[in-house]
Amino acid sequence: MITRPWLVVRPRRLPISFRVDRRVPLVLLCALLVTLAAMVINIGVGEYPVAPLDVIRTVLGLPTGNPTDVLIVNTLRLPRMLVAALVGLGLGTAGAILQGLTRNPLAEPAILGISSGAGLVAVTLIVVVRNVPASVISVSTFTGALLITGLIYVLAWRGGDSPIRLVLVGVGLSSMAAALISVMITFGDINDVQRALVWLTGSVYGSTWSEVWSLLPWTIVFVPLAILLARDLNALSLGEEVARGLGSKIMLRRGLLLVTAVALTATTVAAAGTIGFVGLVAPHVARRLVGSDQSGLLPTAGILGTLIVVLADLVGRTIFAPIELPCGLVTAAIGAPFFLFLLYQQRHT
Amino acid sequence: MISSLRAARPLHIARSRPVLLLGLLVCLVLLGFAMMASIAFGSADIAPADVWAALVAYDPSSMEHLIIRTLRLPRAVIAALVGASLAVAGALMQGLTRNPLADPHILGIENGASLGVVTAVFFLNISSLRMYALYAFSGAAVTAMAVYALGSLGRGGPTPLKITVAGAIFTALLTSLTTGILILNQRTLEEVRFWLAGSVAGRDLSLLLQVAPYLLVGLVLALALGRQITTISLGDDVARGLGQRTGWVKGLVAIATVLLAGGAVAVAGPIGFVGLVIPHITRFLVGQDYRWILPYATLVGAIFLVLCDVLARLVLSSFELPVGIVTALVGGPVFVYLVRWRVKR
């Protein structure tokens, strides 16, 4: 038997207890520091550069001696960066939940069909209805994501739920949505189609404080909820029989976890479109760093997701400036080779 | 992780040999009907007698005969071949990776082909379907080899998990590069968007002859490997225990997949769903034995794509839908229905 150096947290007053891998606190701290650094750099870099120290002072409300910094940082770049961060956090966490629930390493928000409904709604609004304001698109896509997930759940329900049926029904429905999207892309006006492609790739371009405020409550509720449910996810990811044997109320807990993943995905999709790859990669990298115990895995995947999207947005803004690449493009274009490198290394050690 | 998803498959359905053979015969007859329908229906109204005459007693001076022989017949044959190839390629991938979500997608084949065509249009300004086929096949083959090579690195050789993950990563990377070009360059988008939806329209006999050898070799290779794939789908250890040289089998399966899916995507563009769904449907019909799954997948895939192509032509009278869209819209509900009623756990 391998003895793992567990770290047990059991507060005397509170009726909760945690047991995490000893690597977790250190990894979390490092990831957090790197992410904060990336955030500061993200805000500082651009057509009008701001020094890192000035960025921190401005965000904290201290004067920097340059009054335009406040406009640049607090009005233009900070909200955009925050949206990127919250989107990454949501996608990383949702991806980890879904991979644990379905026990499939390829599961990500897209595969459950959550984002396909949103995509269908968004492309319809952009290509068929046309000239729809961004706020309407964001509300409608959120609704679309929830509707299609509800539909998937109803269709997969047969005297009980089953992760396998959920995944397969999700695949079926999302390929139908993809077909309808493909009709519009093939026959729509070319300019609208290009706009729709940008949305489908995922971009945080033009994000304002209102997006931040609409994302924040969901994140505040559902990310901690996910971490609280980590122990059940551990049980569930061992298989249904084991989970039942361990006394987990399977249906309720699985339902809660699913709702969490759906809510996080739907809000991120509404704010930034369908950013791929983050929900797939962040959990994999996290698993390499802290092992597969979910109470350590979920927060790590969340923070890594944040880091990936913030960096991707930075690269997308700067690499071909003044042309801006949507950050969903960069997450895959940069993230994929990086992930391959990680896998390669893993195999040679 | 993957093994748990194998539970998605229904329990073994034992059917007797005569029943299975009879089933194959029925499928063959159905395919014949489907192809006749595909030849008979179209925007030009041609009497059934003329259709028949064009096939058995060709008269080059007749306009109707010309349409049947040069447009509709090649199109029906292409649809059948492409459907069969995609379905078999999907079945091969699902057997090899033991993941029910696997399809030619997993080796990055469709996305490799798309990127090949999109970059060729962007940099070289190509515009004929023949050139598309060339670049699509090259893109598909290069990608599949890269995915397979990456999935084989390290200890244990090409394990299903490593291939699956490498394929998923490549797919994401290639999709993003393709979309990048399409977002930045409107001319390319305009040029390729119909091709990207997947269609068998406007493909002529010469294109078919160009690709048919790949498809036929792939089909023969796949059908010959049925027994080995059944063994390997039980797990590497079991297969090795039974004396199988798993490395060889995996390599041959990969080659067959590339020939089939690469050839199919070269002719018709990326047609989704056939490779994913038809193997599932086939498995619901005949159980887990790939010696039967593969021939059934060949016929059912062919029937499915031929019928979808007929629908694509008839559903809207003013213009034709790309068949890749019809496959998803028709196959999707069937798939959901099957999952709902046949996946017990």
Image (cartoon, coloured by chain):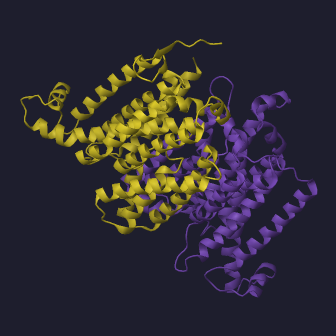
Looking at the picture, tell me which residue is in the foreground, A81 or A213: A213
A146 with respect to A311 (left or right): right
- Quadrant that contains the C terminus of chain A: top right
Is A209 situated above or below B23?
above
- Across and down, in percent, residue A280 comes to 50, 38
Q: Residue at x 78, y 82 (%)?
A: B52
Looking at the picture, tell me which residue is in the foreground, A12 or B82: A12
- Across and down, in percent, residue B106 comes to 61, 44
B103 with respect to A139 (left or right): right
* Colour displayed for chain A in the image of the structure: yellow
Is A140 situated above or below B317?
above
Q: Residue at x 70, y 40 (%)?
A: B98
Looking at the picture, tell me which residue is in the foreground, B144 or A304: A304
Which quarter of the figure has residue A245?
top right
- Quadrant that contains the N terminus of chain A: top right
Q: Residue at x 81, y 64 (%)?
A: B27
- Across and down, in percent, residue B207 comes to 65, 62
Is A8 situated above or below B343?
above
- Across and down, in percent, residue B287 comes to 80, 50
B79 with respect to B245 (left or right): left
Which quarter of the figure has residue A122?
bottom left
* Colour displayed for chain B in the image of the structure: purple
Residue B273 in sight in this render = yes
Looking at the picture, tell me which residue is in the foreground, A333 or B160: B160
